[in-house]
Image: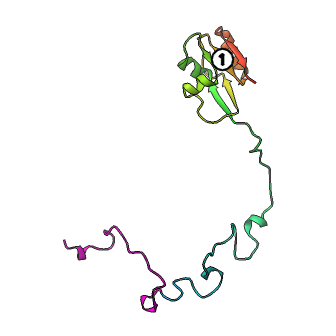
Amino acid sequence: MIINDVHRGIVKRKNRKRVGRGLGSGHGKTAGRGDKGHSAHPGHSHRFAFEGGQMPLVRRLAKRGFSNKFFSKVVAIVNVADLEELFENGSTVDPAALAEKKLVVKKYDAIKVLGNGTLTKKLTVKAHEFSSSAMEKIKAAGGQAERLV
C-alpha cells in the first residue's frame, strides 16, 4: 500500500479550511460569511433566545408555576438497615460517623433516619429528623434517638 492510495477516511487529520486567502482559493473575499449585515461582521453573536427580531418563544409563552429551589432543604436519608449493617453494638451514630462510613456524602441541610429494615443493635442515633417507625425500632432495640437542632 502506498500513502497516496489511502482514501480520506483513513487519514487521521483533515486539513482545516483557510478562508479569506484570495479569490482563487474559493473561500476568499467574504470568506463564507455572505454579504454585509450583522452576522458578517466581527464580534457577531446573538443574544440568548434571539430569533431574528420576531418575538422569541421564551417571551411568547406565559410564565407558569413557581420554584422553591432557593428555600428548599436538602435532606440526606439513612435507613435503619444501613445502621444495622455498618455500626457496632453500643456505638454512637452522628453526622460525623455517617460521613466517615460514607452514608452521607453530599452537602445537606438535615439528616433523616427512616425505618426501612430491622435493627437489633443498641445504638445512640443523633439526627435532625426521624420517621415514627425508625424511632420505634431504635427504642425497641434498646437504643436512643436524639434530635439535633
At a point 65% along the width and 84% down the height, the residue shown is 37
| Residue 130 coordinates in the image, percent (x, y) | 71, 22
Side of 123 where 8 appears, left or right: left
Quick check: is 2 in the magenta stretch? yes
Side of 78 where 4 appears, left or right: left
Side of 13 where 86 appears, left or right: right
| Residue 123 coordinates in the image, percent (x, y) | 62, 13
Q: Characterize the magenta stretch by its predominant secondary structure.
A: loop
| Residue 149 coordinates in the image, percent (x, y) | 76, 24
The amino acid sitting under disc 1 is Val
Where 70 falls versus 74 (above or below)?
Answer: below
Where 136 falls versus 23 (above or below)?
Answer: above
Where 10 falls versus 36 (above or below)?
Answer: above
| Residue 92 coordinates in the image, percent (x, y) | 62, 15
Q: Residue furthest left?
A: 1
Quick check: is 54 in the magenta stretch? no
What residue is shown with label 1? 125
Q: Which residues are magenta?
A: 1-27
At a point 54% along the width and 25% down the height, the residue shown is 101
Task: Say which quadrant the N terminus sits in.
Answer: bottom left
* Quadrant assignment, res 108: top right
Q: Nearer the viewer, residue 15 or 72?
A: 15
Regarding mark 1 in the picture, which secondary structure is present there?
strand
Side of 60 where 28 appears, left or right: left
Q: Residue furthest bottom?
A: 23
At a point 66% along the width and 14% down the height, the residue shown is 138
